Amino acid sequence: MDYRLVDLNGSGVGWTPSTKEHVAKFIRPALAPENQKGNAMRNRLRVAHLLAWLACSSWLEAATTLTISKQGQEFCLEWQGAGILETADSVQGPWKEVPGAVSPHKKTAETAAAYFRIKTVMAYLNVTTAGTGKGSVVSQPAGIECGTDCSEAFLLNTLVTLTALPEAGSVFEGWSGACTGTGAGQVVMDANKSVTATFGQAPTSALVNGDFEQGPSVGWTQQPGPLIYRARDYGVEPYSGDYVAYLGYESDNRHVATLSQRVTLPSTFPLYLNLAIWLYSEELCDVGYYDWFGFYIGGQAIVENARLCRGNTGGDGWRRISLDISAYAGQNVVLAFQIGSNSFDPLASWALLDALFLSDQPWE
């Protein structure tokens, strides 16, 4: 026990047993007239003892400090932070709460010894990590740094904010236990609490050669012939890299062109196919037949422009789009882009594709 004894008259008497509890004791003469003499009067001088004992558990690094000072004919007890002022007739107790006591609390000197302590009420927060990914969790106020320090005591009713930090190649999937959701986790420490942070592996693109930079012969089925070219061979700038997929009119007067690939999609929700696209058409919009363009999974249209003509291409130049394919997550499917003509006339439109990748986030 670590006690400290202080005489209010300044004698500075003190001792230090082994503890993390701090005790301050103040002594003053009773308020008898100093001009009275004789043993009888001196015997009536009473000594009032006021002992303050700050109690805290051994796992706390820093205790709430209770200080006592004399103010006129009273003693003033002051402390900072959360805590409950308790009093007892002896160090052994029993201790009871001083009703309504807040810092500063004033106490008139008594003939009998009185003992005071600050009872610091704590609650434990335990954090665990789970899942196939890797990451850590930190807290505000500081204390939790999990990985390494996953348990901490906080003052009762403290609002603790937890932040999940996924490592490279991992994503944060959410909280469970005392808080939920995927944002910052907030926990009110009105009791001992437990929280689990789940990390998953970041979805990797199941597409082979999604940016086409491995050249025309890798990953994709192309019909009726090669569809992957160097963009500058067609006099356009690629969205990224050198290669693009070109689906459109050619000298063979084709009526349809299809770019497809069979993939096993990640079991991730949500799941998006993000890509850059450039649509162009020479078709007139006031005729009865149009070219069309679409994206399909297993033959089902995910998005389709059935009236591809001038002024109905979504704008000139590259655009970034995100296609929600969450309904097919985890499945082995065929992804297909197709352009075609609704008439006997050959294609009069084209589509450029670049930078295709799968993600759990849409492309902003």
Image: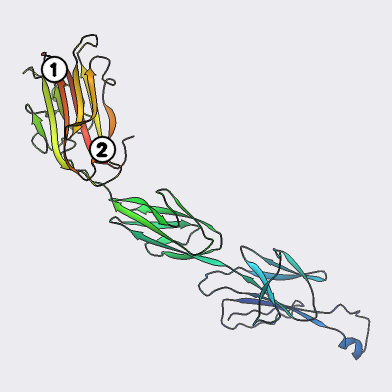
For the question of whether residue 208 can be seen, the reply is: no
Q: Is residue 188 left or right of residue 261?
A: right
Separation of marks 2 and 1 at Cα, in angstroms: 28 Å
Residue at the top extreme?
286
Quadrant occupied by the N terminus: bottom right
**Residue that badge 2 annotates:** 325
Closer to the N terminus: mark 2 or mark 1? 2
Q: Position of residue 69 (x, y in %)?
A: 74, 70
Residue drawn at x 56%, y 63% is: 156
Q: Residues within 10 Å of mark 2 (few under 14, many from 20)?
A: some
Residue drawn at x 10%, y 38% is: 218
Q: Position of residue 229 (x, y in %)?
A: 12, 28
For the question of whether residue 88 can be seen, the reply is: yes
Mark 2 vs mark 1: in front: 2
Q: Is residue 230 left or right of residue 8?
A: left
363 up-or-down from 293: above or below: below
How many numbered marks appear? Answer: 2
Quadrant occupied by the C terminus: top left
Q: Is residue 64 left or right of residue 145?
A: right
Q: Amino acid at mark 1?
A: Leu
- Which disc number belongs to residue 347? 1
Disc 1 element: loop
Q: Amino acid at mark 2?
A: Ile
Q: Position of residue 6 (x, y in %)?
A: 70, 78
119 up-or-down from 33: above or below: above
16 up-or-down from 177: above or below: below
